[in-house]
Amino acid sequence: MELVSPGIGLIFWMTLAFGVVLYILGKFAWKPILKSLKDRENSIDQALHEADKARQEMKALKFSNEELMADAKEERDSLLKQAREIKEKLIEDARVKANEEANRIIESARETIENEKMAAMVDLKNQIARLSIEIAEKVLEHELDDKSKQKEYVDLLIKKANLN
């Protein structure tokens, strides 16, 4: 029960012990504790400052990254546009060359047909000339014999020529 109603002696010794502990703590422990708390506070402040700085750098990097992405997309679009233009130009060039080649082939075929037509005409004229010469030879042969026979023979040859 003495603890509930302490005596003067107990209060004195408790106060003296508390004072000694307080003096020892103030002399030896308070400064290092306060110093370590101050150091801890400084390191926390520094960590917060570095975190803010890192956050700012991340924002700058994100902005820079977005700019790079936009530039890359723009360059990609430009390259795709150039590729499309090149493709269309190649297709158009191929179309023009194909048309030129087709026209050249058609013109060559026309010339070949014309040449063959002319060759056929020359051949036909040669055949007609040869037949005319043969007829003339036969007429001359018969002419030497008799004039009435010659006339009959010429009529006969003409009939035969009309049938062919």
Image (cartoon, grey):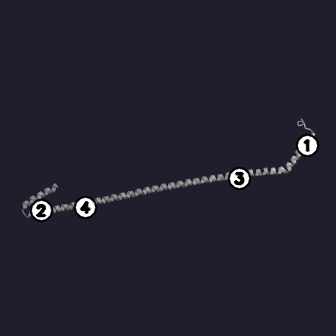
What crowding class fits label 1: few (fewer than 14 Cα within 10 Å), some (14-19), or many (20 or more)? few
**Helix or strand or loop: what does disc 3 sit on?**
helix
Q: CA distance from mark 3 to mark 1?
A: 51 Å
Give whichever of discs 3 and 1 has the lower sequence position. Answer: 1
User: Closer to the observer: label 1 or label 4?
Assistant: 1
Q: CA distance from mark 1 to mark 4?
A: 149 Å
Give whichever of discs 2 and 3 has the lower sequence position. Answer: 3
User: Closer to the observer: label 1 or label 2?
Assistant: 1
User: Closer to the observer: label 2 or label 3?
Assistant: 3
- Residue sitting at x 91%, y 41%: 11
Residue 75, picture quadrant: bottom right
User: Closer to the observer: label 3 or label 1?
Assistant: 1
Quadrant into which the C terminus falls: bottom left
Which residue is disc 4 drawn over?
A: 119
- Residue sitting at x 89%, y 45%: 17
Q: CA distance from mark 2 to mark 3?
A: 128 Å
Which residue is disc 1 drawn over?
A: 13
Report whether 128 appears left or right of 45. left
Which residue is disc 3 drawn over?
A: 50
What crowding class fits label 2: few (fewer than 14 Cα within 10 Å), some (14-19), or many (20 or more)? some
* C-beta proximity under 8 Å, tags 3 and 1: no
- Residue sitting at x 31%, y 58%: 109
Residue sitting at the far front:
1
Give whichever of discs 3 and 4 has the lower sequence position. Answer: 3
At label 3, the amino acid type is Glu
At label 4, the amino acid type is Ala
**Helix or strand or loop: what does disc 2 sit on?**
helix
At label 1, the amino acid type is Trp
